[in-house]
Amino acid sequence: MPQPMTHAAPTASVDGYTPKLLTLFAEGYGFADLRRDAAAGLTVAIVALPLSMAIAVASGVAPAQGLYTAIVGGFLVSALGGSRFQIGGPAGAFIVLVSATVARHGLDGLILTVFLSGLMLTVLGLLRLGRFIRLIPHPVIVGFTAGIAVTIFASQLKDLLGLTLPGAEPGELAPKLVVLTRALPTISWPAAGLAAGVVAVILGLRRWRPTLPGLLFAVVGASLLAAVLHLPVATIGTRFGSVPSGLPFPALPTFSATKVLAVLPAALSFTLLGGIESLLSAMVADGMTGRKHRSNMELVAQGIANIGSALFGGIAVTGTIARTATNVRAGGKSPVAGMLHAAFILAFMALAAPLASYIPLSALAGVLAVVAWNMAEKDEIGVLLRDWRTAAVLLATFGLTLARDLTTGIAAGCLLALAFSLASKRRKA
């Protein structure tokens, strides 16, 4: 009897706030496990490398900041998280929020926003509120995800087509589309051709050779083609200069009461989206592996990862479904795979950062066009539209996410779903 009693008490504690990494080491971890995790980590790094830079560029910051986020945030999410398989880093879902925050509050404001969001996520986890995020209705999640996908695609049209605009590109969707339509006569056919080629290679390899790293092959191929043929296209180097060969020194963001109050609404939006996205990703990993993640520990880890990312000048961190699924498919068995994925990206920066300057921006836009296409859950949308109630919730969330912002869309969708639920219960009563 004493032995089971001794074992039962830690189990309750473990289910709450013990990182999966510690559980793994307690169970035993050998060289064969490390070898499998290293192979999976390298595979995920190959996917994350161009994607992290593309997300950063689309978010209105330098590509290096996307790499900082993947390295620091990715390492902390895996080392401290409540999932064995979660891969953290910059996510396409945050592009709209990050770019709007940069435009409104500047880079310093963005770093402060990420830092505050990290604190909030940590508090949410410590208060055991992770389970409540799962209660957000499915049509709401599908609706705001589709809205984000449309917004991401619209944000890439300028670089996809190599358009020249007379002034700054509007942030709102409708004015943006008007300005881009007027700029169509300035299309750069080399840029558009490279973007189309990147999309074709990624989709083609995904269909016929799914084990190959289509993102990397497409971006490297476009970069070589642009360099060899001396194509007149914008590159990372021409717009942002060289990519650093390592991490910067950590530094606290600039604090002031006025600045904190100014960025607080954005920090709340970052926290809401980060919590939803990370726990959805962990649930996807659970479904693929039969494991169960610790939602509150996962939120705490996401919070610490965002704080760490902000200290190194990175952007928002969350669990990413595509990279997490890639990790599982590649044979990753533990959080060590995610930690090694961060180390591999750091090794790239140290050894090959100058090569990133040759990457065409239209190639990165092509990568994000595919990301946007994949984000929209087209089959789920078709199913939800068959019932007028779920269709109303989905369309309200989708429309308000596009017309207003993410927080408004989610709030409206949840309220509408609640109203339908209450009305249904009254009829049954």
Image (cartoon, rainbow, N blue to C red):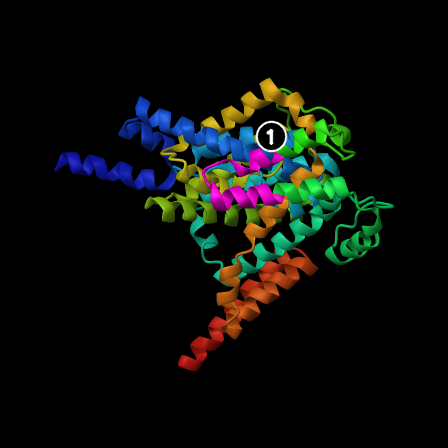
Asked if residue 156 lies left or right of residue 8, the reply is right
Magenta part of the protein: which range?
199-220
Q: Answer above or below: position of 147 versus 161.
A: below
Can I make out residue 307 in this image?
Answer: no
Estimate the x, y position of residue 263 in percent, counting from the top left: 69, 44
Estimate the x, y position of residue 310 in percent, counting from the top left: 61, 32
Seen from this angle, which residue lies furthest front? 229
Given residues 243 and 137, the one toward you in this image is 243
At x 36%, y 29%, the residue is 36
Asked if residue 143 lies left or right of residue 98, the reply is left
At x 54%, y 44%, the residue is 204
Screen quadrant of the N terminus:
top left
Estimate the x, y position of residue 321 in percent, counting from the top left: 49, 45
Magenta span includes 253: no
**Residue type at tag 1:** Leu
| Residue under label 1 | 67
Asked if residue 148 lies left or right of residue 328, the reply is right
Magenta segment, prevailing SS (helix, strand or loop): helix
At x 74%, y 40%, the residue is 191
At x 16%, y 34%, the residue is 3
